[in-house]
Amino acid sequence: MTFDWKIPPWQRNEDCTHMAVMLTSAGGEQVALTTESVRGDNATEALADLLMGPGGAGGAVLLPSLIAVVVRRGIDVMWMAQPPIHVAAVGDGEWNIAVEGADKDDVTAFSAKDTRDLFARLQAAYSAG
């Protein structure tokens, strides 16, 4: 699998352009949020930076507790400190995710499956082996 970028986002020497929030199930319908600033020209590149970058979350996507990753364009420290994301279990491992006060063009939610699929493609294309 090939990607359109000339330089992978995790290898770029540039400022962060997006925020990523990893949502994981903490049991009992409790959800844990982990935020990080990431680089990329779009949400998919930002997710790739989260997964493959130094100290990246690649290993975390393999955990069965992963619900989704929400990526938002721009950097807002207050948003990162307390992301206005609401998550509710709807059964059968499905979750509803809502983000308050964000333009739909600026926010992308990647399901656990989509995140794992991208990670597998990145591993196949970029991991030494």
Image (cartoon, helix red, strand yellow):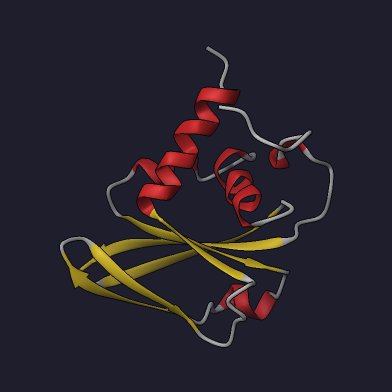
- Foreground residue among 71 and 79: 71
> Looking at the image, which residue sits at the far left?
92
Q: Is residue 116 left or right of residue 73?
A: left
Q: Is residue 28 visible?
A: no
Total tally of numbered discs in the picture: 0
- Foreground residue among 33 and 45: 45
Residue displayed at 29% across by 54% down: 65
Q: Position of residue 60 (x, y in %)?
A: 42, 45
Q: Position of residue 1 (x, y in %)?
A: 55, 27
- Foreground residue among 60 and 4: 4
Image position of 129 with respect to 22: above or below:
above
Q: Is residue 127 left or right of residue 11?
A: left
Dividing the picture into quadrants, the one containing residue 13 is: top right
Image position of 46 with respect to 33: above or below:
above
Residue displayed at 28% across by 72% down: 30
Q: Is residue 94 left or right of residue 79?
A: left
Image position of 62 with respect to 14: above or below:
above
Q: Position of residue 70 (x, y in %)?
A: 51, 64
Residue displayed at 51% across by 45% down: 57
Dividing the picture into quadrants, the one containing residue 94 is: bottom left
Residue displayed at 84% across by 49% down: 14
